[in-house]
Image (cartoon, rainbow, N blue to C red):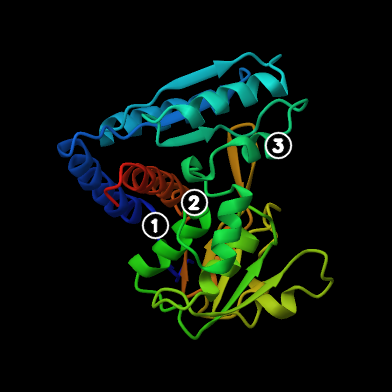
Amino acid sequence: MSSARLLPGAPVAEQVLSEVAASVAELRAAGVTPALATVLVGDDDASAGYIRIKSRQAAELGFVSPHVHLAASASQADLHAVLADFNADKTVHGVLVQYPIPGHLDYDRALAELDPDKDVDGMHPVNMGRLALGLPGPLPCTPAGIEALLAFHGVPVAGREVVILGRGATLGRPLAMLLAQKRPTANAAVTVVHTGVADWPRYTRRAEILVAAAGVPGIVRPEHVRPGAVVVGGGVRYEGRRLLPDVDESCAEVAGAITPRVGGVGPTTVAMLFRNAVDAARRQSGLG
């Protein structure tokens, strides 16, 4: 029987997107139409679906959303050329390259070609450096979404022990930097542990806030959780379209609060992408 309080992401996303819509309206009133460009390489059904969802959301918020669809056979140079065009286009404020891209292409090389100020994923090396130094810039979307989720649901973070299971570049490492920063919704004692540590449960069992970010389905079980802890499921894998989270559902029997299996961190990640996009439009237009 589940006893944990659920921490859904949808109301967090609704609040963030409401703020984004207000910012878009201000920009449009000042004569600036925010533009979020998308790039899809190949014909992966799931990736095409994600692009459609983001394009619909962009339209609802008042963005224009130019899109380029490259064939699966496109070369690295083809992809770089598209990014160069968007970099040079002053009417485009943000660019999203849908991941994954075909295996013969190098996503990191492509990302490095993007103007870091148009990087709405917050994953460009320059933006990761800005995060490490505490400088303004677009934040990685999933880590920023997790901070917002905890704040929205009134989970205190400052001064508490946060353990992150996973050290990946998209979640574990940037989240550790974000939650250690001096800010009311952060300022935590953060430990990063990973599956290369044989006794990783020794660390997770002491966490007041545990974030699973390993990308290993079901790796976190009740015996790995401190009773009453807050558990955030950040890592997932997909089997076809079936979502396989890091956190086993039975952890709700031990945790004090927990994100739901579906609808936890996901909605906040998308919301943060649009927050990055509108912030980019404000900066580039001199209004932010």
* Position in image of residue 100 (x %, y %): 65, 33
Name the residue beneath numbered marker 3. Answer: 109
Q: Earlier in the sequence, mark 2 or mark 3?
A: 3
Q: Amino acid at mark 1?
A: Pro
Q: Mark 1 or 2, which is nearer the eye?
A: 2
Q: Is residue 143 above or below residue 53?
A: below
Disc assigned to residue 8: 1
Up-down relation of residue 217 to residue 70 (above or below):
below
Q: Nearer the viewer, residue 147 or 70?
A: 70
Circle 3: element type: helix
Under mark 2, the amino acid is Cys
Q: Nearer the viewer, residue 240 or 250?
A: 240
Chain-order first, disc 1 or disc 2: 1
- The residue lying at 30 percent from left, 29 percent from top is 59
Q: CA distance from mark 2 to mark 3?
A: 20 Å
Mark number for residue 141?
A: 2
CB within 8 Å, label 1 to label 2: no
Q: Are marks 2 and 3 in contact (CB under 8 Å)?
A: no
Amino acid marked by disc 3:
Arg
Q: Position of residue 162 (x, y in %)?
A: 57, 76
Horizontal relation, residue 31 to residue 63: left or right: left
Image height check: is 181 above or below 96?
below
Q: Secondary structure at mark 1?
A: loop
* Any part of residue 248 in sight: no
Q: Which mark is residue 103?
A: none
Residue 280 picture location, percent across and down: 39, 45
The Cα atoms of the two marked residues, 3 and 1, are separated by 35 Å
Quadrant in the picture for residue 147: bottom left
| Disc number lying in front (2 or 3) | 3
Q: Residues within 10 Å of mark 3 (few under 14, many from 20)?
A: few
Q: Residue at x 78, y 25 (%)?
A: 104
